[in-house]
């Protein structure tokens, strides 16, 4: 099972993409920026979860 951070990070990334898309459609620059920031945060969180998964897998072997 993937680390909780990976799941949350992926969700945050997708939510950020949606927020950015809505900002594009409505012309809301603040919403677009928030969406991009959420995507970066989600990618970082996902990467942290990947490291945790790798460390957990190493301990099992």
Image (tube, rainbow, N blue to C red):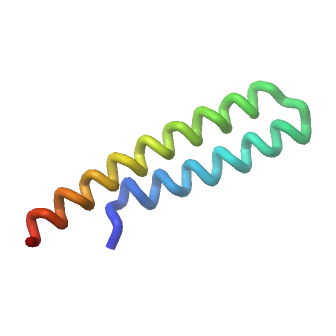
The answer to whether 61 appears left or right of 43 in the picture is: left
In the image, residue 54 lies at what x, y percent? 23, 59
Relative height, residue 12 to residue 4 (above, below): above
Q: Tell how many labels.
A: 0
Q: Nearer the viewer, residue 2 or 61?
A: 61
Quadrant of the image containing the N terminus: bottom left
Q: Is residue 25 above or below residue 14?
A: above
Above or below residue 48? Residue 36 is above
Residue 47 % position (x, y): 38, 48
Tell me the quarter of the picture where residue 44 sits. Answer: top left
Task: Out of 59 and 38, give the one closest to the viewer.
Answer: 59
Locate residue 7: give its quadrant.
Answer: bottom left
Looking at this rendering, what residue extends furthest in the top direction?
29
Query: Which residue is rendered at x = 35% and y = 67% of the image?
Result: 2
Q: Is residue 17 left or right of residue 24?
A: left
Q: Position of residue 48 (x, y in %)?
A: 33, 47
* Residue at the image point whose x is 27% and y is 51% from the top: 51
Quadrant, the C terminus: bottom left
Question: Horizontal and vertical percent for residue 40?
Answer: 53, 37
In-image side of 13 versus 26 (left or right): left
**Residue 36 in the image: above or below residue 5:** above
Q: Residue at x 55, y 49 (%)?
A: 12
User: In the image, what residue occupies the spot 10% across and 71% down?
Assistant: 60
């Amino acid at each position: 099972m993937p680390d909780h951070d990976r799941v949350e990070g992926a969700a945050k990334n997708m939510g950020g993409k949606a927020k950015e898309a809505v900002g594009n459609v409505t012309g809301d620059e603040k919403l677009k920026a928030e969406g991009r920031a959420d995507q970066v945060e989600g990618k970082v969180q996902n990467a942290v979860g990947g490291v945790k998964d790798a460390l957990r897998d190493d301990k099992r072997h």
